[in-house]
Image (cartoon, grey):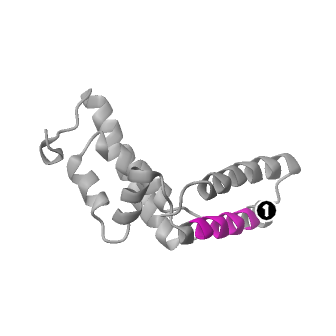
Amino acid sequence: MPSSERHPQGHPALRHLCLVLGLVFTALGFVGVFLPVLPTVPFLILAAACFARSSQRLETWLLEHRHFGPLLRDWRARGAIPRRAKWMALSGSALGFVMFIRGSQPGWPLIAMVGGVMLFGVVYVFTRPDA
């Protein structure tokens, strides 16, 4: 069946949950456009995955979006992330980490835990192929 005729299947409650999560991830992704410490594309990747299970119309809208569509399609096809996006992720993570330390004055265990999670994310991003 062509993708234009495909309808998400599965339990209705799961489809509704995926739809709600997709909308939340889309909102977070668009907020991330304006806040440098909040990532945009990872939230939109999650949104597209949720919409694939709940709303073909919203999935198509995201995949054909003028700005984000190419990034999402590259991710789906090859797991690729543009080099510029990788450096933006590193910059945003570094800025977020500095703001976290200066704004909350956490203890060393929390600094190590947050830094480790951020480092894991940045390493993951930089090990993906370039788009």
Label 1 sits on residue: 101
The secondary structure that most of the magenta stretch takes on is helix
Identified at 34% across, 63% down, the residue is 69
Density class for disc 1 (Cα within 10 Å; few <14, some 14-19, many ≥20) is some
Quadrant for the N terminus, please: top left
In the drawing, does residue 102 fall left or right of residue 71? right
Identified at 74% across, 51% down, the residue is 114
Q: Amino acid at mark 1?
A: Ile
In the drawing, does residue 93 fall left or right of residue 60? right
The stretch in magenta equals 86-98
113 over 66 or under it: above or below: above
Where's residue 130, x and y in %?
Answer: 53, 63
Identified at 45% across, 60% down, the residue is 29
Where's residue 6, x and y in %?
Answer: 16, 40
Check residue 72 for magenta coloring: no
Where's residue 32, x and y in %?
Answer: 50, 65
The quarter holding residue 62 reads bottom left
Judge by depth and name the residue closer to the eye, 59 or 99: 59
- The answer to whether residue 24 is visible is no
Residue at disc 1, secondary structure: helix
- The answer to whether residue 51 is visible is yes
In the drawing, does residue 44 fall left or right of residue 94? left
Extreme residue in the right direction: 108
